[in-house]
Image (tube, grey):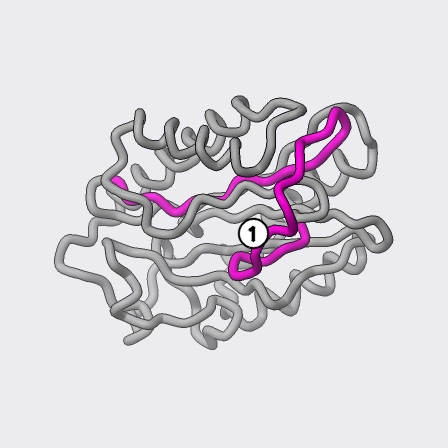
Amino acid sequence: MTTALSNKEAVGERYVLETMRHAQQMTWEAVERIARAMVPGMRESEAQLRGKEILAGMGMDRIWHPLLIRFGANTLKTFKQRSEGDPQLAENDIFFVDMGVVWQGHEGDAGATFTTGSDPEMIACAAASKTLFTQVENLWRKGVAGTELYQYAADQAQAMGWKLNLDIKGHRVSDFPHAIHRGGDLGDFEALPNAGLWILEIQIAHPERPFGAFYEDLLI
């Protein structure tokens, strides 16, 4: 998908689409490695330290947004909200990993939700966040503006029996640092989002129980 770049989609001189794809792949590898390192009994603070060790060992350039690992009820927290306490991961629990890492001067950003044990509603919630992401991603591929993507996401989440957090509406990435371009949120972008420049974020909540799920990836 390629449309004329707007000012909100400005990139730096180093930006290369294929390097963005590499950053995406490396970030997903890191998410999976960190998720495998999470074990019941571990506290969130311990998880953060372990996650940073894993990232350092993978040869990243740097972290461009804080590594977030949320357990249990803290999966309802948004990026800017602090976790409540320092909970331990339970035998039947839900958690997500969210990271923004620079690889070869380009910003990777990915997040996904995982479960321990066999709680069926937690497993369903984690799966639903990825399913909803895929549905919205497929709509984007048809050439839909960012504003419409999140209205669709909200409608689909409700139909699926979950609550979409519309305080989380996606954002820009590019060569580091993308922030100088001030692209704003994907959910407020009224044009057709170009590939390799936008992160689609999905955060849902269980309608009754105190947990949720998160999934994000690069639209490419």
Side of 38 where 190 appears, left or right: left
Stretch of the chain drawn in magenta: 75-103
Residue at (52% x, 32% y) in the render = 47
Determine which quarter of the picture holds residue 50.
top left
The answer to if 170 sits in the magenta stretch is no
* Place of residue 68 in the rendered image (x, y in percent of width and height, measured from the top left): 50, 45
Side of 74 where 192 appears, left or right: left
**Looking at the image, residue 114 lies above or below residue 163:** above
Q: Name the secondary structure under disc 1.
A: helix
**Looking at the image, residue 53 lies above or below residue 129:** above
The answer to if 93 sits in the magenta stretch is yes
Q: Decide which of 98, 154 is in the foreground and name it.
A: 98
* Place of residue 160 in the rendered image (x, y in percent of width and height, measured from the top left): 79, 52
Residue at (77% x, 28% y) in the render = 92
Residue at (44% x, 52% y) in the render = 219
Task: Identify the image quadrant of the N terminus.
Answer: bottom left
Determine which quarter of the picture holds residue 4.
bottom left
Residue to which mark 1 is pinned: 138
* Place of residue 150 in the rendered image (x, y in percent of width and height, measured from the top left): 60, 66
Side of 218 where 57 appears, left or right: left
Q: Decide which of 87, 56 is in the foreground and name it.
A: 87
Please tell me how many numbered marks the rendered image carries: 1
Say what amino acid the circle numbered 1 marks.
Answer: Asn
